[in-house]
Amino acid sequence: MNKYLLQLLLLIFTSCGGEESEEEAISTNEQNNSLESGYIPTDYELIKSDEFDSFDNSNWSKGLTHSTNSSIRMIWNKNTGGENLLNNNYAGYLLDDNVYVNNGLLYLDNRKQSITGTDPVGQFNYSTGWINSLQKINFNGTTKNIYLEIKAKFPKGDKVWPAIWLIDDSENRRWPPEIDIWEYFGKFFNTNRRDEMYMRFIYGLWNDKKDHSYALKNFQSTYNSSYKFHIFGFNWTENDMKWYIDGELVHTKNKGVEVPSEDWPNKTMCIVMNNGLMRVVDEGNTIFPNSLIIDYLRFYEKN
């Protein structure tokens, strides 16, 4: 009888303790997401890393310009853009306050607020956070093969448009080229397409641009990236570009195949990381504030 009573008590105890509390579930989830690395190619050496224990001005500038030399800047639209707006595809006015580090994480926020803009002049209903590595972190993967690894969470919602991308950082910079490593669309412009992560290369001339784009569909549905950290990898060599999520290859562009050989990027490029909001898309299910959150960025070169 004691034996059966003990088994019954054990069964009751196990049943009562079988469901995790929400806090316990989150804690377990975060432990499962404490990824240290995704995929690092063979013979690549760590050259630089930012673990975002603080905001490192030697690596990054806030907004669209260099932190100490305003003549070094991203190329914004001369008619619709300015120091605080790349172009009128975006709804958010760039504010330095929307860029901050907290508990070892970099936050780039979208916020809903009323702003009277000065550059460009206008009324804005949102603010957003951007950083760039102009003349601080730059590289040419064609001449020296590189691998970037970024541990991040991407926000979700119809209106959000966050991205991690590369632009020309040579002395006489121009646009294109542009490599959109990870460009997320909650809703893709005035279409019915939603929840897509783009990997694309834009090339050619500004008045005759071309691109090769690949969209990873159902991104948030698949990866739950607004809640879970994932490791996003990008390998750029003289012959191909490869994209990885948690070590799994998700896309490849080959020189001479997806991209014409004569258009393969051979420029020194730097990194832009931004949250964003699409002007022509309604808020829909978007929650404010929302954040692109970066745990670390690590930069490797082939030996």
Image (spheres, rainbow, N blue to C red):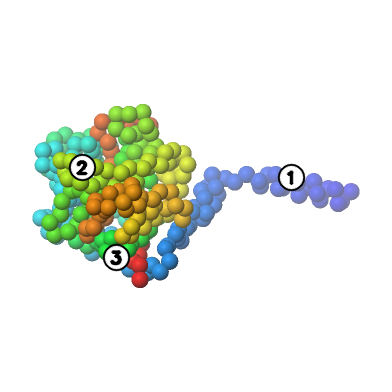
Query: Identity of the amino acid at label 3?
Result: Lys
Query: Identity of the amino acid at label 1?
Result: Ile
Left or right: where does residue 81 sit relative to residue 167?
Answer: left
Q: Which of the 4 quarters of the picture holds residue 188?
A: top left
Query: Identity of the amino acid at label 2?
Result: Lys
The answer for how far apart the CA atoms under marks 3 and 2 are is: 26 Å
* Element type at mark 2: strand
Residue 194 placement (x, y as % from top left): 38, 34
Instruction: Specify few, some or many for label 2: CA neighbours under 10 Å numbering under 14, 14-19, or 20 or more.
Output: few
Residue 247 placement (x, y as % from top left): 46, 55
- Residue position marked by numbered label 3 in the rendering: 144
Of the two numbered discs 3 and 1 on the same chain, state the one appearing first in sequence.
Answer: 1
- Residue position marked by numbered label 2 in the rendering: 209
Of the two numbered discs 2 and 1 on the same chain, state the one appearing first in sequence.
Answer: 1
Name which residue lies at 36% across and 60% down. Answer: 147
Name which residue lies at 19% across and 57% down. Answer: 169
User: Answer yes or no: do the residues labelled 3 and 2 have beta carbons within 8 Å?
Assistant: no
Name which residue lies at 80% across and 49% down. Answer: 7
| Residue at the extreme right | 1
Give 233 or 7, whichever is nearer the viewer: 233
- Residue position marked by numbered label 1 in the rendering: 12
Give the position of the C terminus as an image quadrant: bottom left
Whether residue 133 appears in this view of the structure is no
In the image, residue 278 sits, relative to residue 41, either above or below, namely above
Residue 168 placement (x, y as % from top left): 20, 54
